[in-house]
Amino acid sequence: MSIAANISRLEAQLDQHHCKLIAVSKTKPPETIMEAYSGGFRRFGENRAQELVDKQQQLPTDIEWHMIGHLQRNKVKYLAPFVSMIHGVDNLKLLREINKQAEKAQRVIPCLLQVHIAQEESKFGFKLEELPELLKSAVFEGLEHVQILGLMGMATFTNDRQQIQGEFRNLKNLFNKLDGMDSPPNFQMKELSMGMSNDFEIALEEGSTMVRIGSRIFGARN
């Protein structure tokens, strides 16, 4: 199947759940991304800042670039002028740096807060119990150049369907809890980014609004 056909098939499945597709193009060359682009697709995700910057400079300007990987604070300035959304905001220092660089770029950057829901210690994110307390504090006020639009999470890499389901459900429950709280204007629960090639069907069942899929579109990574 062609890349465009893979995307079309996935989008038909996702549309039933009102869920957006982020095509994960990490390690794929610009020519491969252009195959998807030529089929009408515009939403791509990268997990390394330098690779994202390189591709953005080589590819059409109407592409919607999503930073989906762990982002170091010293790399934010390179993405701030153009990135469409940063999914992996996993600490407050990073959020403040994004706000600072967005102000310099004279724009507001949409962000998702990454929550640690997996059993693996190698994954990043806020603790589940941490965010309601932070929302009650004044920590998000004054960050006028970031717009927090929801949450992102990565389930444990396992074949245990019940475990994955439970982790996604915990994130959805947190999403609902935060959505019901009083929050500043720059904090809204609109997007829930969870689910990748190996577990996106479970994520859809649990309420994901964005899935990040690479290998099912482009084939195995290099």
Image (cartoon, rainbow, N blue to C red):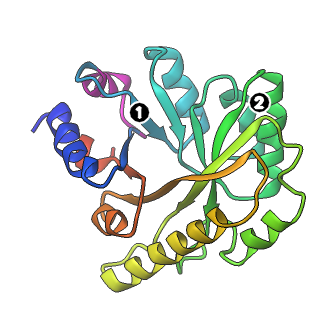
The range drawn in magenta is: 26-37
Residue under the point 84% across and 35% down? 100
Question: At x 66% / y 66%, what residue is drawn?
Answer: 178
Q: Percent x, y for residue 204?
A: 33, 62
Helix, strand or loop at disc 1? strand
Q: Residues within 10 Å of mark 2 (few under 14, many from 20)?
A: many
Q: Is residue 159 left or right of residue 206?
A: left
Residue type of the residue flagged with mark 1 = Arg
What is the x, y in percent for residue 128?
65, 75
Which residue is painted at 42% across and 35% down in the image? Answer: 44
Q: How would you classify the magenta stretch by its main secondary structure? A: helix
Q: Which residue is mark 2?
A: 102
Quadrant, the N terminus: top left
Q: Residue at x 77, y 22 (%)?
A: 105
Q: In terms of depth relative to the viewer, which is nearer, 143 or 53?
A: 143
Secondary structure of the residue carrying tag 2 is helix
Looking at the rendered image, the quarter that the C terminus falls into is top left
Q: Are marks 2 and 1 in contact (CB under 8 Å)?
A: no
| Residue 85 drawn in magenta | no
Residue kind at label 2, given as amino acid type: Ala
Q: Is residue 146 above or below residue 208?
A: above
* Rendered location of residue 47, percent (x, y): 52, 45
Query: Dot 1 corresponds to which residue?
Result: 43
Is residue 219 visible in the rendered image? The answer is no
Q: Let me know if residue 35 is in the magenta part.
A: yes
| Side of 188 where 212 appears, left or right | left
Among the two numbered marks 2 and 1 on one chain, the one whose residue lies closer to the N terminus: 1
